[in-house]
Image (spheres, grey):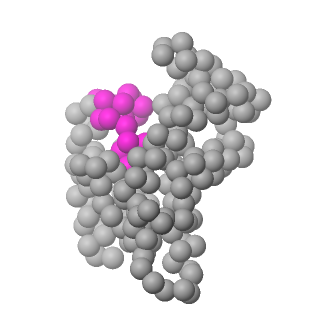
Amino acid sequence: MEARQAEITRLLREGEPAAARVLPLVYEELHRIAEQRMRHESADHTLQATALVNEAYLRLVGSRNLEWRDRRHFYAAAAEAMRRVLIDHARRLRTQKRGGDREQFTLGSGDHGMQLDPDRFLALDEALEQLAREDPQAADVTRLRFFSDLSMREIAESLAISERSAHREWTFARARLFELLDGA
């Protein structure tokens, strides 16, 4: 496992030419994260885990900023890309004029997940952007928790903060997001 992680980090540091070789090494983990996100969705959800992973990966390698420090940094970027894909998907759903039941989005792991229809999902995105303006670190913790489902220890390592600080930021972020969403 350590050799595989080291290989991923080495390829990521090489940049754009090695980016295509990273996918086979990270695909399984990205797919597991996407499946976990989509597991709480309705069976007829129009976005599948495979499509979420593929779209997020295309956005990652399509960007011109391919300078990842290590695999944790890459997974954080992948989580952000998945978040953007889900936001774009929610916006497309919201603009459809067909009506009917709203699809549900689940954010976070089972113990702290929230089910949101597309309008609430977009409201959450706006609240998360407001949180980022107020407390960028709390927003980073939130993104890593919701969209990467990293443990607090992994989040602390990724952000180079103490685990206690990660917990404190997560507690603040949840309270602030609920406050912002309550006003929406």
Q: Which residues are magenta?
A: 142-162
Q: Residue furthest front?
A: 43
Q: Main secondary structure of the magenta part?
A: helix
Q: Residue 108 location, x and y as percent?
A: 34, 51
Compare residues 104 and 175 and report the one nearer the observer. Answer: 104
Compare residues 109 and 73 and report the one nearer the observer. Answer: 109
Q: Residue 166 location, x and y as percent?
A: 29, 38
Q: Residue at x 54, y 12 (%)?
A: 3
Judge left or right: residue 148 versus residue 170.
right
Tell me if residue 151 can be seen.
Answer: yes
Q: Residue 38 location, x and y as percent?
A: 44, 54
Tell me if residue 140 can be seen.
Answer: no
Q: Residue at x 54, y 34 (%)?
A: 28
Compared with 130, 29 (above or below) is above
Judge left or right: residue 49 versus residue 113.
right
Compare residues 45 and 141 and report the one nearer the observer. Answer: 45
Q: Is residue 141 located in the magenta-colored stretch of the structure?
A: no
Q: Residue furthest top?
A: 3
Compared with 114, 144 (above or below) is above
Q: Residue at x 32, y 48 (%)?
A: 109
Q: Residue 66 location, x and y as percent?
A: 67, 36
Compare residues 35 and 183 and report the one nearer the observer. Answer: 35
Q: Is residue 157 located in the magenta-colored stretch of the structure?
A: yes
Q: Quadrant of residue 127?
A: bottom left
Q: Quadrant of residue 91?
A: bottom right
Q: Residue at x 63, y 44 (%)?
A: 57
